[in-house]
Image (tube, helix red, strand yellow):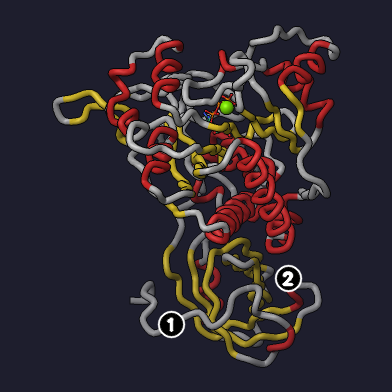
Amino acid sequence: MKCLLNDWRRTNFAKTTTPEISGEKVTVMGWVHEIRDLGGIIFVIIRDVTGKVQITAPSKKVESEILEELRKFRKESVVAIKGMVQEAGKAPNGVEIIPEEIKILNMANQPLPMDPTEKVKAEIDTRLDSRFLDLRKDNTSAIFKIKSRMLHTIRDYFYSQEFIEINTPKLVASATEGGTELFPITYFEKEAFLGQSPQLYKQMMMASGMDKVFEIGQIFRAEEHDTLRHLNEAVSIDAEASFMDDVDVMKILNDMLIQVLNDINDKCSNELEILGHEIEIPKKDFPKVTYDEAVDIVNSNDVEMEWGEDLSRAAEKALGDVMGGFYFLTEWPSEIKPFYVMPYENDESKSHAFDLMYNNLELSSGATRVHQYELLVKQIEDKGLNPAGFGSYLKAFEYGMPPHAGWGVGADRLTMVLTGSENIRECVLFPRDRHRLTP
Ligand code: ATP
Ligand code: MG
């Protein structure tokens, strides 16, 4: 059958089909991006993962059977072409391929649900409904190439610092951590939940003696809000380290992000150019602003904020306008942070918790954790929760839990920063929000 690969294999990609190899025979495979039939000559642009290459078929040079096949091409069909490379100043990459053999591997139905050439622009909902087609656009795929590189660099960084990668369960028995709504599920004859974060598990790992762990995994939050920075399923990059405090893990987060920024600049310059986005690399460590200072800044910029309140959206914006770029927000009131956060020894109303912000976007929350059993039980009770629901977590604190600290970074939010995206949905392949559960 003509639609099977059989012994056909790619010899070249668009990117490797260059004037230097003119005169050579190549096999390229990809999607039909554009067809122009001028009668005496047919031009076809083929798109693959690396870019675009032009097929040029003058009727004088190319067999009529090949011309007939080319005329059957439909936009976005998958094709394979064998032919001779020839220099061509005006074509992409400065070359064209004169076709000698053709396979139509799979024909695309017409009309297409959206136009990947963007001659007709589509709304985000239409694009997400046909995400596979949307991803054929170089500006959409650039985001996910950058995200992939980001995760690669982050793993490299963690391994270089001797962190151990872990995977903790996402099916959990109780809705204990607080701070967000959870998705209940049916677990055989019981009710269970989708995990809101690996927090309690990565802390239990501190009692394992493995010292430093990280996890890159899904988190689920049943929040109803519909914003440009929240989804109901997100990816969290979590780290936890023993014998360290908040200052130590802020330094780790700072160093890791500088490595990410440098690496994306180096390795993804093409993708950044496609997106028209520039990455500025801070020369010094990220500045720190205390919660107290933040309250003053916010109030002096005509947004009301009382001490002890979480930052409203307006407060985040006011603070972001003043601070700009990456900055840590430290010394949070204990009241608005979770039970596992360590209070200051001399002033229990304040805690060793921090957030990392980029302009007005929260990227990460972290803290020194409570490692003392009695204090932990007290803080659970103070938050109006029942320690009985924390049996297996608390047990890890009874038999030798070291002091520890950690943080969680939203991978999708970090991708927004790296790609200059305004909407988190741009940075998730198949986003889950209040209205979307498919595809
Ligand atoms: P926010 O205040 O912005 O709702 P949060 O304080 O509830 O965030 P944390 O529980 O601190 O979030 O989670 C750690 C990080 O995970 C956040 O800083 C953010 O980067 C990311 N994150 C949390 N919730 C979501 C979400 N619903 N969608 C996308 N990313 C999220
Ligand atoms: Mg937070």
Q: Secondary structure at mark 2?
A: helix
Q: Which residue is the extreme one toward the bottom?
A: 23
Give the SS element for disc 1. Answer: loop
Q: Pointer 2: what residue?
A: 92
Q: Is residue 148 visible?
A: no
Where residue 239 appears, x then y in whole percent? 51, 44
Residue 350 image position (x, y, % from top left): 63, 18
Please tell me which residue is depicted at 71% across the width and 51% down the height of the picture. 258
Q: Position of residue 397 (x, y in %)?
A: 37, 32
Labelled pair 1, 2 in contact (Cβ < 8 Å): no
| Quadrant including the N terminus | bottom left
Graded by Cα atoms within 10 Å as few (under 14), some (14 to 19) or many (20 or more), the crowding at tag 1 reads some
Q: Disc 1 marks which amino acid? A: Trp
Label 2 CA crowd tier, 10 Å (few <14, some 14–19, many 20+): some
State the image quarter where residue 421 is shown: top right
Q: Is mark 2 within 8 Å of ligand 1?
A: no
Q: CA distance from mark 1 to mark 2?
A: 24 Å
Query: What's the residue type where badge 2 is placed?
Result: Pro
Q: Which residue appears at 64% of the width and 11% of the height?
A: 309
Residue 120 drawn above or below residue 422 = below
Q: Earlier in the sequence, mark 1 or mark 2?
A: 1
Residue identifier under label 1 = 8
Front residue (pair 437, 315): 315
Residue 109 visible in image: yes
Q: Give the position of the C terminus as an image quadrant.
A: top left
Where's residue 58, x and y in %? 67, 80
Q: Is mark 1 within 8 Å of ligand 1?
A: no
Q: Against 365, is 276 above or below?
A: below
Q: Residue at x 58, y 42 (%)?
A: 427
